[in-house]
């Protein structure tokens, strides 16, 4: 209220001043409104691996497609095992075509116009198996959903880890660039004073150029990795990334992973298809059991004759099973054997993958600890000692340059190992993560 009062008072002295103030205030409000999305994005904080996977599972078209397939299988399931629709029967019986009464519907006492209904009754075993097949189809669709969610989570994790590795590698190289520039300056000074040869000075200068090239290459890779991550999570791929998860434990026993291999999401569709193939065998065998149908007709004759009703029963006779039902049964049995072989192959391959990932995760974490405790500090100390010795006149410029090159390579090897450990952990973790496997 005081602000409004001041505006009014000032307006009596300068009628345009309050207009300018109002426009300025409005511009500020518009600016704040436009900046709100950016501020909200900043408040979200770094994008973690779990955040990226969770967002992708909500938005990925692959997940949506598999869920729609499951919905379709569930929608059609209630119709399985039902009786077929009844059939309307209509026609003319005993219509004369040659005498003087030809084509007459009323002159001959045997001519009848009839209408009726027929219902087929498949055997109860067939209807039960049809319902069971619908349940198997739902199980296959559910297995595909689980596998799709796992594959999506794994692909997003790989894309996120690749982007994080490029980001961290770039940061480490940039932090080492001042050391390379220091050696290049020392090389030029040594060349001028006669302490070093031109080759040594050029070697130090080349290190700076090579480091710049590697930084440019990593910047390019970072943009590429971000673009690949954006395929899954759109604009969120531009958010800052959290640290690479190398110290996280599994939420389940590694031994349990090997024990419950058939229950893992990647194998869910294979096992469901095997059960579906076995049901198809039973359904093919059930075709040897006869179906039957009933037909009821009402027949109208000429006015001088009584109308009639008829009730008929039809029973199928599967007498030629050798050439009809048996070949179908043999086909279904062969498909079952094929599905069993595919299941065995998938179980073996998946078991080998789990053992590989477990070894990479366990030994990789041990190697990371060794890098942190020994290799990285030694590489850094060696590099510093070499340049210090050179500055004191007791060392060699080439040795100082080589020690920095070794430190650079060691830093990048460490980051690559972080990515390998994180990828192994993600592969194992998502096998039992409830949000991924449901």
Image (cartoon, rainbow, N blue to C red):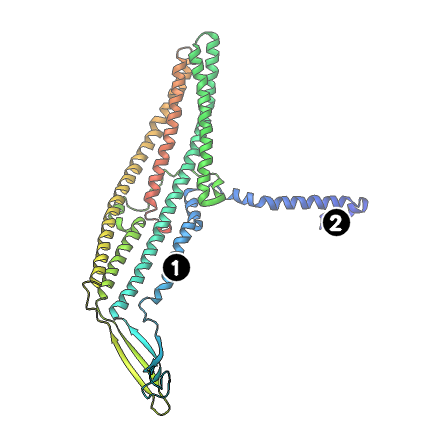
Q: Nearer the viewer, residue 192 or 332?
A: 332
Q: Vertical placement of 251 versus 381: above or below?
A: below
| Horizontal relation, residue 206 to residue 333: left or right | right
Residue 89, position as x, y percentages in the image: 35, 77
Residue 286 appears at what percent x and percent y? 23, 66
**In the figure, 66 relative to 49: above or below?**
below
The residue depicted at 41 percent of the width and 34 percent of the height is 165
Pick the residue in front: 322 or 33. Answer: 322
Q: Nearer the viewer, residue 102 or 106?
A: 102
Relative horizontal placement of residue 30, taking residue 307 as reference (left or right): right
The mark that comes first in sequence, 1 or 2, is 2
Residue 329 at what x, y percent from top left? 21, 60
Foreground residue among 33 and 261: 261
SS under mark 2: helix
Point out which mark residue 38 bears: none
To which residue does mark 1 refer?
A: 71
**Taking the image as drawn, is residue 179 in sight?**
no
Count of marks overlaid on the render: 2
Q: Is residue 201 left or right of residue 313?
A: right
Taking 222 as reference, is 391 above or below it?
A: above
The image quadrant of residue 218 is: top left
Spatial CA span between label 1 and label 2: 64 Å
Which element carries disc 1, helix, strand or loop? helix
Quadrant of residue 16 within the rendered picture: top right
Q: Position of residue 348 (x, y in %)?
A: 24, 45
Residue placed under numbered mark 2 in the picture: 5
């Amino acid at each position: 209220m005081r602000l409004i009062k001041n505006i009014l008072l000032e307006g009596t002295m300068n009628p345009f001043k309050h207009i300018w103030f109002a426009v300025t205030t409005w511009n500020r409000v518009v600016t704040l409104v436009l900046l709100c999305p950016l501020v909200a994005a900043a408040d979200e904080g770094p994008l973690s691996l779990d955040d990226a996977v969770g967002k992708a599972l909500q938005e990925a078209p692959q997940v949506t497609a598999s869920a729609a397939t499951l919905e379709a299988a569930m929608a059609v399931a209630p119709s399985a095992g039902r009786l077929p629709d009844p059939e309307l029967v209509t026609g003319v019986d005993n219509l004369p075509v040659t005498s003087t009464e030809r084509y007459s519907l009323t002159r001959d006492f045997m001519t009848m116009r009839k209408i009726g209904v027929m219902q087929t009754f498949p055997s109860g075993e067939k209807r039960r198996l049809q319902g069971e097949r619908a349940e198997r189809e739902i199980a296959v669709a559910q297995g595909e959903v689980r596998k799709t969610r796992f594959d999506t989570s794994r692909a997003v994790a790989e894309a996120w880890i690749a982007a994080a590795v490029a980001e961290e590698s770039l940061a480490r190289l940039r932090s080492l660039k001042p050391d390379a520039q220091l050696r290049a300056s020392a090389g030029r000074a040594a060349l001028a004073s006669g302490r070093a040869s031109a080759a040594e000075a050029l070697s130090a200068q080349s290190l700076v150029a090579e480091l710049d090239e590697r930084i440019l290459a990593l910047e390019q890779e970072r943009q590429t990795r971000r673009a690949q991550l954006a395929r899954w999570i759109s604009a969120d791929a531009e958010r800052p990334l959290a640290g690479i998860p190398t110290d996280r434990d599994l939420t389940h026993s590694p031994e349990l992973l090997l024990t419950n291999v058939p229950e893992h999401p990647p194998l869910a569709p294979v096992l469901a298809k095997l059960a579906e193939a076995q049901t198809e065998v039973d359904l093919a065998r059930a075709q040897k059991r006869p179906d039957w149908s009933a037909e009821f007709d009402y027949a109208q004759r000429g006015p001088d004759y009584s109308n009639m009703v008829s009730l008929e029963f039809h029973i199928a006779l599967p007498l030629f099973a050798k050439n009809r039902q048996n070949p179908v049964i043999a086909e279904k049995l062969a498909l079952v054997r094929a599905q069993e072989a595919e299941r065995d192959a998938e179980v073996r391959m998946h078991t080998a993958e789990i053992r590989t990932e477990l070894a990479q995760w366990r030994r990789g974490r041990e190697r990371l600890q060794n890098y942190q405790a020994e290799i990285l500090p030694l590489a850094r100390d060696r590099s510093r000692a070499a340049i210090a010795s050179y500055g004191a006149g007791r060392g060699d410029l080439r040795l100082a340059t080589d020690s920095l090159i070794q430190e650079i390579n060691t830093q990048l090897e460490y980051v690559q190992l972080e990515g390998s450990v994180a990828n192994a952990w993600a592969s194992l973790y998502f096998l039992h993560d409830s949000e991924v496997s449901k």
